[in-house]
Image: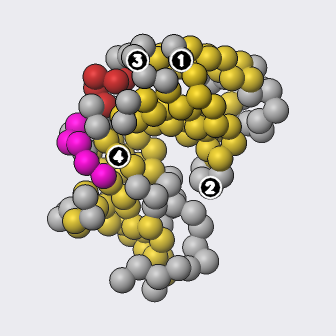
Amino acid sequence: MILPTSTGKNAIAVSSDNLVSLATSSSYQWFLNEQKIDGAVGRTYAYNGNEGVYRVVTYEGTCNRSSGLVTITGMEENATQLKIYPNPVDDDLFIEFNSSYPAQATMTDLLGRTIITTVFDGSINIPVVHLTNGIYLLKVIAGGREIVKKIVVSH
């Protein structure tokens, strides 16, 4: 059973090969479609392109914290259709997404707080001059598929 605790927020960063818990902790457990993944107990999990719904639980003493859910679907196919630049960004972030569906872009900080949410067709320019330096997560959703990228803001 996972109980609420006062431990820090837990989120997942997604790359083309790995899922990474953004929380530092003494131990981890990864889940796929709400089933424990045997042996997946490190901060990083190599998901090998396997589609599904992932989450990670971090443990610190008797406390634990579950991340939000991350859905992996058609990542490679969508990743080739998405261009995000420049990264690191200091002024304006450009997003180009070749999709027949309108796309939603949501940028969050590492605590999971939503910073920017917008809907666009094809491409968009997002000003980031008001953001403090740091790492953010950009999630682009279109046609029921999503891609999450790490964005570095550096002024």
Query: Which-is-in-front pick, marks 2 and 3?
Result: 3
Residue 153 location (% of width, % of height): 68, 31
Q: Which residue is drawn at 46% across and 76% down?
A: 64
Q: Earlier in the sequence, mark 2 or mark 4?
A: 4
> Observer-nearest residue: 17 or 84?
84
Kind of residue indicated by mark 4: Thr
Calculate the distance from the C-alpha at mark 1 to the C-alpha at mark 4.
Answer: 22 Å
Q: In this view, does 12 lie above or below 10?
A: above
Residue contact at pointers 1 and 3, CB within 8 angstroms: no
Q: Which residue lies furthest to the left in this view?
A: 38
Q: Which of marks 1 and 4 is nearer the N terminus?
A: 4
Residue 9 location (% of width, % of height): 57, 63
Kind of residue indicated by mark 2: Leu
Residue range in magenta is 49-53
* Residue at the disc numbered 1: 121
Of the numbered discs in the image, which one, if any, rests on residue 99? Answer: 3
Kind of residue indicated by mark 3: Ser
Calculate the distance from the C-alpha at mark 2 to the C-alpha at mark 4.
Answer: 19 Å
Query: Which-is-in-front pick, marks 2 and 1?
Result: 1
Q: Residue furthest front?
A: 101
Calculate the distance from the C-alpha at mark 3 to the C-alpha at mark 4.
Answer: 18 Å
Q: Is residue 38 left or right of residue 101?
A: left
* Residue at the disc numbered 4: 71
Residue 80 location (% of width, % of height): 35, 17
Which element carries disc 2, helix, strand or loop?
loop
Q: In this view, does 18 lie to the left or right of 59?
A: left
Question: Hey, which quadrant is residue 86 in on the image?
Answer: top right
